[in-house]
Amino acid sequence: MAPPKRPDGTAPSDSRARTGADPRVWRRRRWILVILLVLLVHMLAVIGFLRMPGPLIPLDVSETPALEAVLLPPPRPARPPPAVPHPTPKPRPAAPQPVPKAVETPPEPPAPPVATSEGGTTETVTGPGGNGAGAAAAPSPAPAPAGPAGPPAQEGEKYVPPPSATMHYASFVNGVQNPDGLIRWEQDGKHYRLAVETRVLWFRFAFQSSGVMTETGLVPERYEENRRGKSEAARFDQSAGTVAFARGTQAQLSPGAQDRFSVFLQLVGRVRGNPQRYAAPGVTEAFQVADTRDMQPMQVQYVGEEEIDTGRGMVRAKHFVRLQRHAGDKRRVEIWLAQSLGWMPVRLRQTEPDGTQIDLVYRSTEGQ
């Protein structure tokens, strides 16, 4: 049956036949279908990925559970079979020793006679061989307390302290006369006190040393310096074997240690005790000398005899020089001891590193 015609007089065309007949339309629809299939596959893949379980390896390895291992104890060693006890041999009886014959003891000597004292009391005197029965045991004397150790005496040394004296000295600085200085020495056989005063320009300097005296020399206990109104002191503790300085420090105290001025009176006593020891130049005395800040070794050497002009006559004296304490030591200390003054200083001179010279020359002794 033929299709009806349209009002315009044309018959309707079959769309499927026309579409299938056009290859461009078919390719377009095929690409659309492929694109739809690809989109569908991707959607299914995305949906499936979201529903999958998490990874098998955790991202944070710190949350991984630790594996616990249980160590089994090693098997016990097999016990050795018990040792079979061996019978111990019985000790043989010791052979009887012969009994020594008794030694005849000599008869005791007769008791010594009894001495009678003037007061009528009697006392038993025990002779050799006696047991002292009936005699009262004599009490042992108590040990005397140990005193401070004096300077160690060397061969040929003997200390004889000078008598107390106050001596005045003319003072010079680089040859210019200054106010007089003095040395005041006091001793009673057991204790001593030494004071030295001088003035340099308008500054006053005072030094004091005090302590005890022994058979071998001086043992300082306190040394004090006063310079331009400032005072410092060092204390010698002979029992502890230390010396405490002004700044709070300490040092070991060697036997025979002296201070800066007691060392000269120690030298005076040695010259007084044995002047012949210093007959030839070169004799050297060694000391440990402390001031208010530290302690240093000191060597004093005898260099010969000289004539010293005191302004009132010439005096013959023995000249001693303090040797360098260390390399580069430019301070020089000299002392002259005169026999006419009981071997007390007739002159003292100190030369400073800058060349300044301070001289003390004997002028007079109080009471003479």
Image: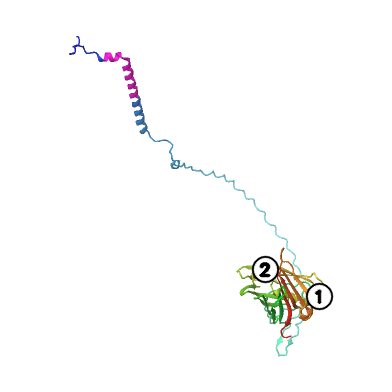
Give the x, y percent position of residue 236: 65, 73
Q: Check if residue 20 falls in the magenta segment.
A: yes
Quarter the N terminus occupies: top left
Dot 1 amino acid type: Gln
Quarter the C terminus occupies: bottom right
- Work out whether mark 2 precedes mark 1 in sequence or the reverse, and give the earlier one: 1
The residue that appears at 71% across and 87% down in the rendered structure is 122
The quarter of the displayed image where residue 340 is located: bottom right
Q: Secondary structure at mark 1?
A: helix
Q: Which mark is residue 276?
A: 1
Q: How many residues crowd around disc 2 within 10 Å: few (fewer than 14), some, or many (20 or more)?
A: many
Residue ID for mark 2: 295
Q: Is residue 244 above or below residue 163?
A: above
Confirm whether residue 51 shows in the render: no
Say left or right for 25 vs 367: left
Confirm whether residue 339 shows in the render: yes
Give the x, y percent position of residue 272: 77, 78
The quarter of the displayed image where residue 7 is located: top left
Residue at far front of view: 176
Say left or right for 184 vs 247: right
> Foreground: 349 or 195?
349
- Could you tell me how far apart the alpha carbons at marks 2 and 1 are, in whole angstroms? 30 Å
Write down the region rendered in magenta: 16-37
The colour scheme used to paint the residues is rainbow
Q: Check if residue 233 falls in the magenta segment.
A: no
Dot 2 amino acid type: Met
Give the x, y percent position of residue 3: 20, 11
Give the x, y percent position of residue 28: 33, 19
> Foreground: 61 or 301?
301
Q: Is residue 80 above or below residue 257?
A: above
